[in-house]
Image (cartoon, rainbow, N blue to C red):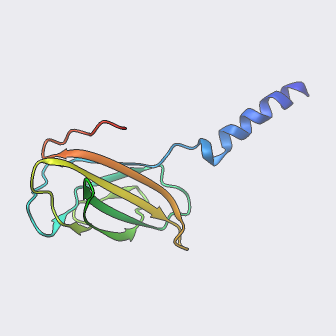
């Protein structure tokens, strides 16, 4: 009985949603052609999308400058193909960040992920 009492709290911690890996977003600028008004997004990969997520808002920013975004359905395989949305494109070299905000069917925000990369070099920015 003592083993059950000792193991049970660890089992609960392992199964609790707070212990789940956070959602992540990754992309690459390879092949992207900037300086276009309606810039097609690069291919993006989302991992650890929360259960119940049905839609998401993808946005692009350069620092505090919002460059646009769109709402799209959450892809079941986590892959957002290139050209799914259009924003103002990166033009000058710099640090640009994509954000994915996933929501439930009722509009409740379930998770948020960010990925910043230098354009056009494709290097990731250091996490702060």
Front-lying residue, 18 or 46: 18
Residue furthest to the top in view is: 2
Q: Nearer the viewer, residue 99 or 49?
A: 99
Q: Residue furthest right?
A: 1
Residue 73 is at least partly visible in this image:
yes
- In percent of width and height, residue 86 lies at 22, 68
Seen at 72% across and 33% down, the residue is: 10
Residue projecting furthest to the bottom: 106
Please give the count of numbered marks on the rendered protein: 0
- Residue 87 in the image: state x and y as whole percent: 21, 67
The location of residue 128, given as percent across then percent down, is 37, 38
Q: Residue at x 52, y 42 (%)?
A: 21
Q: Let me know if residue 26 appears in the view.
A: no
- Image: 114 above or below 36: above
Q: Is residue 107 left or right of residue 40?
A: right
Q: Residue furthest front?
A: 64
Q: Quadrant of the N terminus?
A: top right
Horizontal side of residue 114 vs 14, given as left or right: left
Where residue 120 appears, as percent x and y from the top left, is 12, 46
Residue visible at 13% across and 54% down in the picture = 32
Identify the image quadrant of residue 83.
bottom left
**Residue occupying image coordinates x 8% and y 61%:** 35
């Amino acid at each position: 009985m003592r083993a059950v009492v000792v193991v049970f709290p660890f089992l609960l911690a392992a199964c609790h949603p707070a212990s789940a890996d956070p959602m992540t977003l990754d992309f690459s600028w390879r092949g992207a052609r900037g300086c276009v008004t309606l810039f097609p997004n690069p291919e993006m990969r989302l991992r650890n999308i929360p259960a119940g997520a049905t839609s998401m808002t993808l946005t692009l920013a350069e620092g505090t400058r919002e460059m646009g975004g769109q709402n799209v359905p959450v892809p079941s395989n986590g892959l957002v193909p290139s050209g799914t949305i259009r924003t103002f494109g990166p033009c000058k070299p710099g640090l640009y960040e994509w954000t994915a905000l996933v929501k439930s069917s009722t509009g409740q925000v379930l998770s948020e992920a960010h990925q910043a990369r230098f354009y056009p070099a494709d290097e990731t920015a250091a996490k702060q």
